[in-house]
Amino acid sequence: MTRTVKAKDTSVSQVKKTVARTVTKCEEDIYIQFAGHEWKITDLADKIKDTYVADGHKISAIKKLTVYVKPEEKKAYYVVNETETGCVEF
């Protein structure tokens, strides 16, 4: 669905809210393919979160998750809240 918004009819903040609502309704499937293998990004993120919780942390403590995928090593390195680091194999 495409919406056309006229600048005269709507403020900039209302346009941003409309765009944000439209974008968040999108279903995403993102995969990494390397050397004949395939990994789904959301599966990697879930594995990282499970590992973080297994290490004694609360899932609600995650405010920012940064992931560095190294398919040649079959590992994903992560940083939680810009302080906690680790890696998972996939």
Image (cartoon, rainbow, N blue to C red):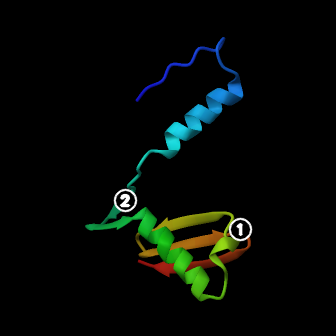
> Which amino acid is tagged 2?
Tyr
The residue at the far front in this view is: 9
Q: Is residue 72 above or below residue 2?
A: below
Task: Give the Cα distance between marks 2 and 1.
Answer: 24 Å
Who's the residue at 55% across and 82% down the image?
Answer: 51
Q: Is residue 7 above or below residue 83?
A: above
Residue 19 position, x and y percent, is 56, 33
Badge 2 or badge 1: first in the primary sequence: 2
**Which residue is tagged 2?**
31
Query: Quick one: SS at disc 2?
Result: strand
Q: Is residue 21 left or right of residue 9?
A: left
| Contact check, label 2 and label 1, Cβ < 8 Å | no
The residue at the far right in this view is: 83
Q: Is residue 41 left or right of residue 77?
A: left
Q: Is residue 55 above or below residue 78?
A: below
Residue nearer the viewer, 77 or 72? 77
Who's the residue at 50% across and 37% down the image?
Answer: 22
- Could you classify mark 1 by the number of other residues whose Cα lies within 10 Å: few (under 14), some (14-19), or many (20 or more)? few
> Which amino acid is tagged 1?
Asn
**Which residue is tagged 1?**
81
Q: Quadrant of residue 77?
A: bottom right
Query: Quick one: SS at disc 1?
Result: loop
